[in-house]
Amino acid sequence: MLFLIVRQFFPVDSEYNLPDWNEFLRMKQSRYNQNRISDAMSFSAVITPLEGWDIVGEMKVRLDVEKNSFERGTPIYENPNKQLYTVYWEYAGISISGNALEKLYMGFIYPAGMPSIIIFLRMYLLLIRINGENIFFKAMAGFQMEVQENSDGYTYKDGMLSDDIFSFANANGTLYAGDNRTHWATMGAYARMNWNYQNVYFLEVSGRYDGSSRFAPGHRWGFFPSFSAGYDIARTDYFQKLELPFSQLKVRVSYGRLGNQNGAGYYDYIGVMPLVAADPNAWLLPGISSTPTQGTIAKTPKMISPYITWEKVDNANLGFDLMLLDNRLSITADIYQRTTRDMIGPAEAIPSIGGIANADRAKVNNATLRNRGWELSVNWHDQLKCGFSYGVGFNLFNYKAVVTKYNNPEGLIFNNHTGLPSNKGYYEGMDIGEIWGYRADDLFMSNREIDDYLRTVDLSFFKPDSQWQRGDLKYLDVDGDGKVDPGKGTLSDHGDLRVIGNATPKYSFGINLNVGYKGFEVSTLFQGVAKRDFPLAGSTYLFGGKNFFKEHLDYFSADQPNGYLPRLTEFNKPDFQANSAYNTSRYLVNAAYMRMKNLMVSYTFNKRMLRNIGLEKSKSIFHV
């Protein structure tokens, strides 16, 4: 269907019938190969010097070697006059295999290698273990360390002389080369104690002391304690006298703190000055040589972040576990609050005269995020006397994340497709995932409607009054000031921008179904989201990128005045921007879905039959 739609706008019946602006034209000339070899080894040992006292050591080593190759030929298209043209398209800022490439043109070859090694070492001592008739007690302590070394190198060259052979010798363009090396390590010690009495009362207390190489000396270590307790009412004497169909009725409560280092870069606390050879701004005046030459320039480093340390993730949880009806029905319910304290955010603003971009400002532990949610899981499993078994499972969860602390004195909102410069704009009280946009529920149906509306409402923020036509979006003046605009994009002045939706998945669910009979078993898993908003602004789905699909035929025209999409406009012009580039209530769609994630059919062979051929167990599985 893609080709049929494209031909409506570019009617050429040819092998090269895709127009030069269509991304699929480039995809046809692209080839990407990824080869990866992973080798892992593990060693472990257990020493028991005394009964109930174990010393356990474990070491794992993994080596990954990856080789990638990306080839992009030179696209050719044919115009309605049967003339063939070669597309010379400049690419900049694209990333392949994690490497950001410099400027290049169509027709290039890119081979790269990416070796990495991970070493994980863990040792723990089971100090004491008591397993009596009514009491169980275990205490242990341990140490662990993890080191990862990454190295990758790449070369690429554009200006392929032909698309028959992709090699450096067959290209006359610019040769680029580079490499990257990174290293990180963690180390920590931990201790844990478990105790329960008659499987009625449960208690666990633990603590970790971890260090990370991502932080400067003096800020690398953090202590993270946790505890949990449980009470199984169904096992008490007074509850069993009630003769209710419960085999488990456990109440759980827990609180713990974990450390998170992922908000920090590998070397944020170190001043790194990138060296750029033959930079346009690095000229060496005549002296040693008789003519000026380009030299290597050391660029200004980012501001260092010497005081950042671990983010603290506090988890508080209350849960219930139920088993009843001879363990055929199980129910698990949890409510929780997860608070991430000391999140790494931007430091205080600095004068622009310093020449430091916002992205290069120092980082500080100065933000807090609160996440509240609940989870519910219900499962039923039964087997009939005839041998037929079946099971049904359902789980549902939901959460809401709110920013409770963030360094945003200007009160900037999350500007994305609002007409203001894009920024993350987190602020205190922000509901993560919120979508700011304009109220625009209808299209202009006639020129008279346009003239009448423009007499009272100023829409010049989007385009001049003379360019509005029927089939354009009709933006509403929500704040009643006689114009539609985003104001300053702040909490105190956001003009006609409103929170029109939320992109966070709400009420995520899963459904498990399985049946079995005489060795045969069929199971499937469905997953989905019951509520989620998705803005079409600036995306391919709303005429973006000049790629067209069947759904794009539902646009406004004289023959189709009730079309869902606005009128057709030329790409990247004010008309196109006004109708497609901004978040609006009309083009905020429901992104709820349900999908079958997998389907499995299996057969377990009879053990008696297998013994005749010397096998203990055999199972055939068909998985989709």
Image: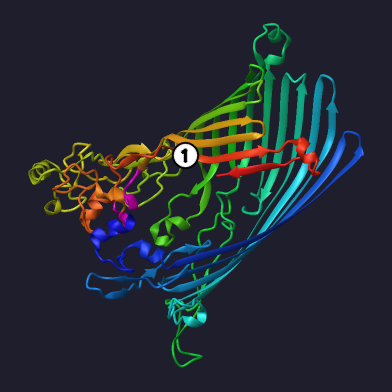
Q: Between 129 and 303, which is closer to the camera in this rendering?
A: 129
Determine which quarter of the picture holds residue 229. Answer: top right
Looking at the rendering, the stretch of residues picked out in magenta corresponds to 535-548
Q: Is 547 within the magenta? A: yes
Q: Is 345 within the magenta? A: no
In the image, taking residue 211 as reference, residue 423 lies left or right, namely: left
- Say which element carries label 1: strand
In the image, taking residue 107 as reference, residue 248 lies left or right, namely: right
Q: Residue at image x 41%, y 65%?
A: 28
Q: Residue 69, image x and y in percent?
A: 53, 68
The colour scheme used to paint the residues is rainbow
Q: Residue at image x 44%, y 87%?
A: 292
| Observer able to see residue 602 | yes
In the image, taking residue 360 as reference, residue 143 lies left or right, namely: right
Disc 1 residue type? Arg
Q: Is residue 610 above or below residue 19?
A: above
- Residue found at the very far top of the displayed protein: 241
- Residue placed under numbered mark 1 in the picture: 595
Q: Split into 4 quadrants, where in the image is the C terminus?
A: top right
Q: Residue 528, image x and y in percent?
A: 47, 36
Determine which quarter of the picture holds residue 522. Answer: top right
